[in-house]
Amino acid sequence: MNQTLRNVLLFIGALAIVGVILAFVNVDETKTLDLTTLATEIEQGNVKSLIIRGTEVDVILRDDTEAIVKKESGESLSELLNNYGVPSEKIRAIPIEVKEASGASYWARVIIPNLIPFILIFGLIWLFFRQVQGQNKNAMSFGQSKAKEMEKDTKNKETFKDVAGVKEAKEELTEIVEFLKIPAKFVALGAKIPKGVLLMGSPGTGKTLLARAVAGEAGVPFFHMSGSEFVEMLVGVGASRVRDLFDKAKKRAPCIVFIDEIDAVGRQRGSGLGGSHDEREQTLNQILVEMDGFEPNQGIIVMAATNRPDVLDPALLRPGRFDRRVILDLPDINDRESILEIHAKNKPLADGAELRALAERTPGFSGADLANLMNEAAILAARRDKKQIEMTDLLESIEKVMLGPERKGRVLQEDERKITAVHEAGHAIVAHLQKNTDPVRKISIISRGRAAGYTLKMPLLDKMMRRRQEYVEDIAVMLGGFAAEKIFFGDITTGASSDMQQVTNLARQMVTQWGMSETLGPRTYGEKDELIFLGREIHENRNYSEGVASKIDQEIDKLISNGLQKAQEIIQQNKEAVVKVSDELLVKETLEREEFYKVIGVPPANPKNLLSDPGTEERKN
């Protein structure tokens, strides 16, 4: 497309240049006189000089204007003028100069204007054939692999030192590195290294970075390509690119072939619309054939990454293909601190900036989120003309990553500010006065993203499992703002719409997925089938009757009603605390954890939430 646009612009430019040339040629043309007029001008004494150029006579008049007179080639100008009755003495009084006819003038006046259209036609034909030739060249390379190769001697290559956390994953991949470096060590014992390694994990957990680190540690060529780059409009192109990719890899063995987002072509077969002629299915079949065709110790390791292992074809996961699966989890608090240290290497941090405290406030953040957090903190510090990144910049960047930037232009009316303050105070009080909730870290009525205000509560330590009572109390916390509005203002607003959506989803998961219903018992309800070509989780297979569906709705309503009742009881008993917190929010707009504890004057129901440094006990252990 760029080449075609360039050719069109070139052709338009050529037309413009030719038009300018023709315009100058036409402008420079002088007027033409006949012999009768010339004779009259000479008799009247208006002619200054004459220049004879073959069959043309350049006439220069007394007013310095120029004209051209045409004459026959076999006759002299004097004879012609005598024939027209011009006296000889007047002819002799005029300076007459004879010059040879100019060839350049002839080309400029006669041949070039006639030749230009032919030049344009041939130029257009040349551009057309050149474009066709380029398309043919692209067609010949259409089935070639678009894989990008990272050479083994790349200066800025990644190693395991650049990957924090994921200790178990690095241990699994260390064997791959050793095999690529010292294959004889494994061959001597009859060991066969896995042909394929599948990296599975949530988005942003470092799957691609880890694959590049393996190549950097092993010092071998690294071919990387996205799964979507195999698929084209024409059937068979993807399979051709797979063959070309593996042919290149065999020539550079030992090496690593990395396919990112392999679920784009590796989805389960038989669920599409194209049958055996589907392009993705053809591409997947070729990948399976190429992996089966490897020699046991040929030195080619196929690595792939996906965050949807549940949709991959079983043939792709069987032993002999992607038979080793490496799972990358979200980092825990120690891993988050290590990741933050890596991303803080080239950033000047102030003395009070503690990465450990930052790691405590970011549960559930992936490695990519933490990298974005440090970058946002650096941008905030630069915007404020600081020389170092301070802790306030780091803490604010957490909220920016989670909720979005501050919306300072969104000005609330005074009554809306009061409702928002009471709403957020309700969330905080209900969370503070229950035993199994996470501690409140921050309360704010400053708009961020789509929220008019927010209350941040974060766990002291990372949790892998949660108890039913924690979710029950979380429902009460989510409804704390709704209950506070109803108690203090006698009415409710649309500010609780997001809370109600979260409460409904949590209650439904407790009943249908986690078996936390006292009436229905330990069973899951509903099986979601993904229709690949029509969308994600568009269809739910209801493996229960209409009667059970009614009981599910009743259980969900019961959980929500009990949570709302609990929230109302806590707020009714602690109205003064809600008023104190809301009044303080109206003045300061934001309350940190220590300020909130000081204002409320009531200790938290969970004594552990009083720890000034939540990571103290963990570090002691």
Image: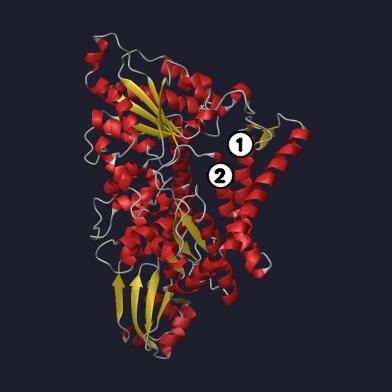
Could you give the CA–CA distance between mark 1 and mark 2, rounded to whole angstroms?
10 Å
- Amino acid at circle 2: Tyr
**Looking at the picture, which amino acid does disc 1 mark?**
Met
Viewed as shown, does residue 246 lie left or right of 561? left
Determine if residue 110 is in view.
no
Q: Is residue 71 above or below residue 405?
A: below
Q: Is mark 1 on a helix, strand or loop?
A: loop
Sooner in the amino-acid sequence: mark 1 or mark 2 = 2
Residue at the spot x=30%, y=72% of the render?
A: 98
Q: Mark 2 points at which residue?
A: 471
577 with respect to 302 (left or right): right
Q: Residue at x 47, y 21 (%)?
A: 317
Give the image location of residue 393, x and y in percent: 34, 62
- Label 1 belongs to which residue? 516
Q: Where is residue 288 in the image (x, y as percent from the top left)?
A: 47, 19
Q: Is residue 440 visible?
A: yes
Residue 22 x/y as whole percent: 45, 65
Q: Do the residues labelled 1 and 2 touch (CB within 8 Å)?
A: yes
Q: By what rule are the colours in the image chosen?
A: secondary structure
Q: What element carries label 2?
A: helix
Q: Which residue lies furthest to the right in this view?
A: 547
Q: Which of 467 and 120 is in front in this view?
A: 467
Q: Is residue 17 above or below residue 414?
A: above
Q: Nearer the viewer, residue 4 or 278?
A: 278
Can you tell which quarter of the image residue 381 is in? bottom left
Whether 199 is drawn above or below 485: the answer is: above
